């Protein structure tokens, strides 16, 4: 502590009391996050969605899980008001109104996979804390299960919406995809978005590139299982990539703000496009200015995601550390600096979390 840092005494104890309440709520909600992730991973939410009021023994049996753990988990779910509890019958019930946001049946509304992503990020807390003192960052290799959790989320939220909502809104691009064009997805992760597109547009040719080997192997495997012959995945750093042909469409889903050198990659993307090509970038719906984000309901999540993942993976490579909340203003400016002649930013009601930037070469 520096010498001038004399602990201050609060003057307004009512304000202090309110903050103490807020802290308790935050800690309880924070504690529920890994429990929601467990509910997602064990499929307990999906199973409870098929059951009427049931005991912990019945739920555990249906889920083929250890009853003692399930009962403790149910305690957290009931006191957290996620499931309902009848103490007389000792039974539990997941109301359908809550199930919509917790189960796989309602893919795009399912927020339980986001809880899994938060627990992955929390796994590197100690390493990130060290960076607060020493600088630098935490590389992708330190995250356990990041690409799986990310792929899970993308499959649920992006793939179907692209073909059913986002691309049909851009009719000429949709038509070109139907007729057959070449597409590159940069930072494709385990390929969930590209796999969905390749299946939907069989006449087009899809290429996916990612820095990390494990998600690429997983993507290649999925393409093989689905017998998709119009898709190729390759492990490569974008900065080293040198395509032999130009592309008609290049996509980046939740990638640019993670990159070490997003400015250079945006310039490369511009070079890799045909003259009438389009760059579609899906990125976080936020402002570049903190004061404009204070009322954004996702803001604390976004700044946390940045600190525990997006910013630190970039800094780990000696990069810019742009951060998750680089924002629309900065994004439009960087796209212009990279040489794109025109950028249209679109929002869709189903996805308040992201902006969709359609840029022409
Ligand atoms: C947040 S993930 C998004 C993955 C995928 N687009 C999705 O929506 O599921 C960002 C991805 O960018 C990849 N990435 C980061 N830097 C890269 C680079 N220099 N070259 C290629 N891929 C990179 C990461 O490995 C990671 O898979």
Image (spheres, rainbow, N blue to C red):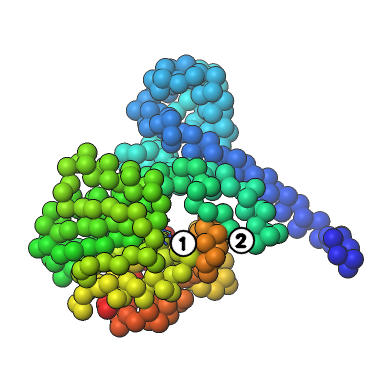
Which residue matches tag 2? 136
Per the image, label 1 sits on a secondary structure element best described as helix
**Which of the two residues, 356 or 97, is positioned nearer the viewer here?**
356
Badge 1: residue crowd in 10 Å (few <14, some 14–19, many ≥20): many
**Which of the two residues, 361 or 220, is positioned nearer the viewer here?**
220
Q: Quadrant of ligand 1?
A: bottom left
Q: Is mark 1 within 8 Å of ligand 1?
A: yes
Where is residue 234 shown, x and y percent of the image? 30, 54
The residue positioned 45% from the left and 21% from the top of the image is: 65
Badge 2: residue crowd in 10 Å (few <14, some 14–19, many ≥20): some
Quadrant in which residue 291 is drawn:
bottom right
> In the displayed structure, does residue 235 sit left or right of residue 19?
left
> In the displayed structure, does residue 201 sit left or right of residue 18?
left
> N-terminal of the two: label 1 or label 2?
2
Where is residue 264 shown, x and y percent of the image? 41, 73
> In the displayed structure, does residue 205 sit left or right of residue 352?
left
Q: CA distance from mark 1 to mark 2?
A: 14 Å
């Amino acid at each position: 502590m520096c010498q001038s840092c004399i602990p201050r005494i609060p003057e307004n104890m009512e304000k202090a009391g309110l903050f103490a309440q807020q802290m308790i709520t935050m800690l309880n909600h924070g504690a529920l996050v890994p429990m929601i992730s467990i509910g997602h991973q064990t499929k307990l939410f999906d199973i409870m969605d098929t059951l009427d009021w049931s005991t912990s023994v019945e739920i555990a049996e249906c889920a083929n899980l250890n009853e003692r753990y399930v009962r403790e988990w149910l305690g957290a779910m009931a006191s957290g008001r996620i499931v309902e509890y009848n103490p007389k019958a000792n039974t539990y019930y997941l109301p359908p109104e809550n199930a919509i946001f917790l189960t796989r049946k309602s893919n795009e509304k399912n927020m339980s996979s986001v809880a899994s992503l938060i627990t992955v990020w929390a796994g590197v807390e100690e390493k990130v804390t060290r960076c607060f003192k020493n600088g630098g960052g935490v590389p992708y290799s330190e995250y356990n299960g990041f690409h799986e959790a990310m792929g899970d989320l993308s499959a649920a939220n992006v793939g179907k919406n692209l073909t059913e909502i986002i691309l049909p809104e851009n009719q000429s691009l949709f038509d070109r995809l139907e007729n057959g064009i070449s597409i590159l997805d940069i930072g494709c992760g385990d390929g969930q978005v590209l796999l969905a597109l390749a299946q939907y547009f069989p006449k087009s040719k899809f290429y996916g590139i990612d820095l990390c080997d494990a998600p690429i192997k997983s993507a290649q495997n999925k393409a093989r299982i689905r017998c998709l012959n119009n898709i190729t995945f390759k492990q490569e750093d974008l900065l080293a990539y040198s395509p032999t042909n130009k592309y008609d469409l290049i996509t980046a889903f939740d990638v640019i703000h993670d990159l070490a050198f997003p400015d250079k990659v945006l310039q490369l993307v511009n070079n890799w496009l045909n003259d009438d090509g389009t760059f579609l970038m899906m990125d976080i719906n936020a402002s570049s200015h903190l004061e404009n984000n204070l009322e954004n309901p996702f803001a604390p999540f976004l700044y946390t995601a940045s600190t525990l993942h997006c910013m630190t993976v970039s800094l780990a490579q000696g990069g810019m550390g742009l951060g998750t909340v680089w924002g629309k203003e900065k994004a439009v400016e960087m796209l212009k600096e990279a040489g794109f002649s025109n950028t249209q930013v679109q929002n869709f009601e189903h996805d308040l979390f992201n902006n969709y930037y359609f840029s022409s070469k």
